[in-house]
Structures are given as structure tokens and as C-alpha cells.
Amino acid sequence: MSRTVYLNGEYLPEAEAKVSIFDRGFLMADGVYEVTSVLDGKLLDFAGHAVRLERSLNELDMASPISMEDLLEVHRELVRLNGINEGMIYLQITRGSSGDRDFAFPDPKTTSSTIVLFTQSKPGMAATPLAKTGIRVISIADQRWARRDIKTVQLLYPSMGKMMAKAAGVDDAWLVEDGMVTEGTSNNAYIVKGNRIITRNLSNDILHGITRAAVLRFAREAQMEVEERAFSIAEAQAADEAFITSASMFVMPVVEIDGVAVGGGKPGPLATRLREIYLDESRKAAI
């Protein structure tokens, strides 16, 4: 069954949606994106994703082709048209096409941004068996550009990191810079010592995760201690627990890092409880 997608103001069958070969998203990775999860046919953390989208656009001096109110309606309509109960909505905005290739930005008064949205149906996303077994990761050097706080479509190195993990027979990779973990290839990284959750502080070095913000808020409300600072792979391997957060994985335990079992090689109680809290509270607040 063909999906209905959204392109520049129109709902179209996916086979009919076309973008210029001169679009700067294609030529220059000159674009930003967001991914919003859908559970029970409703959107999770939409407001947070909308705020981050506006920030990413502003940081790149890129015009938004749509208001956030209209964007919400587009999300809801795509959920309805495609019958999504569990899954994700991918959104991408690029600087558009001026009809040729040039390093200089085109004039936004004469070149419109390109906006694309499409759905991905993922039944069982919330009840994935991985949550009960945990995932294994390797560490790799962080070789991305310096503005990781902007959610751009420059995803080549994270994609390479995923493939490095696959080649090593594990699930994902944690990125390391100056001896310290920055984040996962597409997620934020955490360790647990006692009742204390440790995760890298916000800066240009990491993406300001929407799920991260929600999980840390829920953790503090549950009287869990949170410490925002960098940590090393060695500290992570010696931790009581480790986990990641992302829009698609929610809270996912990490049970092995570079071949060393964490917390006995099984998901720990704190990460397991946080996943339950996040899913329960997010479902209540979904729109």
C-alpha cells in the first residue's frame, strides 16, 4: 500500500512526490529534520519537537515554510491518512532550490524552502523485546562537525557508525571525543551509579534530545538524582547500569560496551522503571 506524503503544501501518493535535483538538501545537506513518535495514533512530545525545529532553522538562518500550528495539523492528517497507530513521522525542511548549484545561500525572498513529511508504521515499537534484553554498543571516534546541537540532515558519519556497529555484531555505537562519550549515533547516552543518572551536559557537542528532556524531568519527579557531566567509556563499563534515549527507542537499556558487560549484562531496575514512566506519562500527554 502506497503512503500518502506531504510535500510543499500538498498531500500526494509517495510515488508522485518529486523534489528538484538542485535542492540544497540533496546537494549540500542544507536542511534540518525532526522525527516525532506516534503511539495509539497520537503524537508524543510534539511541542518539544516544534520548538527544536524552530531553533535549528534559526541557527541556520533558514526560513520556515509553515507555522507550527499548521505543522501540527499536517502531522495529524498524515497519521489519519496512513492509519498509523504506532510509528513515526519524519519531517525535513531544506533551503530549497534556486535552479543551480552554488555555495552561497539563495535569496529566501525568491527561493522557497522545501518541506517534506512522511510516515513510518512500526507496530510493536513500545513493546519491543529489546527493552527486556538490552542492547550492546561499541565506542568509536566522534568525527562529526562541531554543531551537533542543530538537528541537520548531515547524517553520513552517524550512518557509518551504525554500520561499524553492525559489522562488529552489536546494536549501536557510542561516540567518543577527547576521551569522553558525547552521545550515541542517533540517541543520548547515560550511565547509572547508585540512584544517580549521569549524562553529558547540553552544549554544541550533543543534540538537545526531546526524549532526553522528558526523561530527566520524570527522573527528578521520581526523586532520582541527575548529574549532567561527561563520562568515559571506562566509567560506563564500571557503572551499575547504562541506557540510551531517543524518539524511536524511548528508554533503552545498554548491557554491553566494547565487549564488557554492564550491570551483570542485564537491563537494570532504574532504566526499566524510567522506560515504564516515560511511556505512561507520554501516552497521557500525547495529542
Image (cartoon, rainbow, N blue to C red):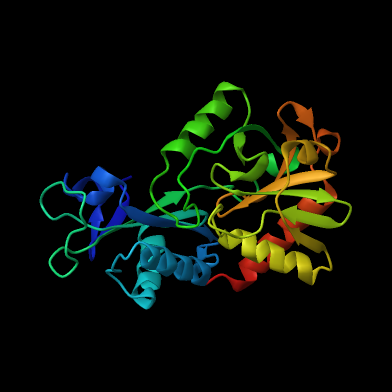
- Point out residue 7 in the picture as x, y percentages from the top left corner: 25, 58
Between 272 and 24, the one nearer to me in the picture: 24
Left or right placement of residue 36 versus residue 118 in this view: right
The quadrant the N terminus occupies is: top left
Q: Is 176 above or below relative to 169? A: below
Report whether 266 appears left or right of 71. Answer: right
> Horizontally, is 69 left or right of 159 in the view?
left
Q: Tell me which residue sits at (38%, 49%) in the image.
A: 153
Q: Is residue 129 visible?
A: no
Rendered view: 160 above or below 274 = above
Residue 63: where, in percent of width, then height?
A: 28, 68
Q: Nearer the viewer, residue 240 or 222?
A: 240
State the residue in front, 7 or 105.
105
In the rendered image, the residue lying farthest to the right is: 194
Residue shown at the point (51%, 47%) measured from the top left: 122
Q: Please indicate, yes or no, whether residue 11 appears anywhere in the rendered image.
A: yes
Q: Residue furthest front?
A: 178
Q: Is residue 77 above or below residue 129?
A: below
Q: Residue at x 64, y 71 (%)?
A: 284
Residue drawn at x 19%, y 64% as measured from the top left = 112
